[in-house]
Amino acid sequence: MTAPFDFAAGWLQENLLLPLLYSLDLMQWEDISFGWALFAVYGAAQVAVTYAICVPLERWRPVERWPDRRAVAVDVLYTLISRIGLLPLITFVLFYKLQVALNGFLTDHGWVPPTLERLVPDLLGQQVLTFFLYVLILDFADYWRHRLSHIFAWWYALHAVHHAQRQMTFWSDDRNHLLDDIFSFCWFTCIALLIGIPPMQFPLLVLLLRLLESLSHANTRVSFGWLGERLLISPRFHRAHHAVTAAGEQSVNYGAILPWWDMLFHTADFSRDFARTGDPTAEEALASGGYLAQQWVGLRRMLRDLVGGKAVTK
Ligand SMILES: [Zn+2]
Ligand SMILES: [Zn+2]
């Protein structure tokens, strides 16, 4: 089952990663370059699975149809950069290195590295339950990261790249400013280190969560029904977060996978029905510009808000 993935990862390691590491004088990373390549291949496979699920859904019951889909193309580029490049690099390579360094430091000082099982000994041997708790904790952390990114104007300046898209599709999940991605990964990595997620499980968890997040961005009239929408975030629920009236500080439905945090902290809105998406306050370049233009305008807006000392957006 894993043989084709291993084969593709071996090929990638030999023909791309090792020559690259050699030319950059980074051969000390050689030992983990196979894992890096493997998660890049998993990332590519995940994009293929997402495509196979979401394209039929978007064709079956589209919310909107656009004669010109040029604005979607940039989101495809964001997805490829993130899923095949950044996510494997950060969730496997950097996380692995950080965890080894942290655990080494703690052991040297006579401390035991933190794990969820140490905090809750009843979880020992309960792998499925532990996995579910990892999802729960990461999703809770992501709710607050996302909510804070709407509160601070300088942070929303970056997050506006995600909200500016008027042609929202399943590709839009990865449409994030590079700096915003780095903040997210730092946030996730800190939590994952604190609860001691094993190094092979962390990238797999992120892959699974991002698959569900892609589905929630799909341009499709799909909702999970009264009960289903309260158990798992649907395209209808997340679309309300992207509504033109929900950009900036006044947004709703911040959750990524589970709607429970929105329900708990009174930010859930189950009433909005497949609204138009976009951020009318965003610069046009953020909506229809190319990748580099969006990155530049987001950065410029962030610096302006930081220097201007704006507390909240809108
Ligand atoms: Zn948002
Ligand atoms: Zn979104």
Image (cartoon, rainbow, N blue to C red):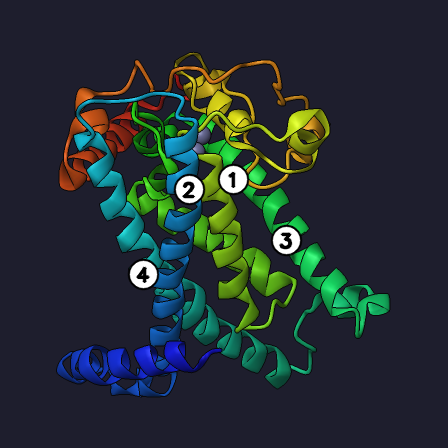
Say few, some or many: other residues with alpha carbon within 10 Å of mark 2 (under 14 / 14 to 19 / 20 or more).
many
On the image, numbered disc 2 is attached to which residue? Answer: 54
Structural distance between the alpha carbons of marks 1 and 2: 26 Å
From this viewpoint, which residue is outermost toward the front? Answer: 60
Structural distance between the alpha carbons of marks 2 and 3: 22 Å
Mark positioned earlier in the residue sequence (1 or 2): 2
Frontmost residue, 226 versus 284: 226
Frontmost residue, 71 versus 177: 71
Structural distance between the alpha carbons of marks 3 and 1: 15 Å
Q: Is residue 214 left or right of residue 81?
A: right
Callout 3 secondary element: helix
Structural distance between the alpha carbons of marks 4 and 2: 19 Å
Q: Nearer the viewer, mark 2 or mark 3?
A: 2
Q: Is residue 177 above or below residue 26?
A: above
Mark positioned earlier in the residue sequence (2 or 3): 2
Instruction: Tell me which corner region of the image, top left, top right, bottom left or bottom right, holds residue 13.
Output: bottom left
Mark positioned earlier in the residue sequence (1 or 4): 4
State the image coordinates of residue 185 (x, y, percent, origin top left). Answer: 44, 54
On the image, numbered disc 1 is attached to which residue? Answer: 145
Q: Is residue 31 above or below residue 240?
A: below
Mark positioned earlier in the residue sequence (3 or 4): 4
Structural distance between the alpha carbons of marks 3 and 4: 22 Å
Q: Is residue 150 left or right of residue 260?
A: left
Q: Nearer the viewer, mark 1 or mark 4?
A: 4
On the image, numbered disc 4 is attached to which residue? Answer: 84
State the image coordinates of residue 276 (x, y, percent, origin top left). Answer: 38, 15
Residue sitting at 26 percent across and 82 percent down?
A: 11
* Mark 1 vs 2: CB contact within 8 A: no
On the image, numbered disc 3 is attached to which residue? Answer: 135
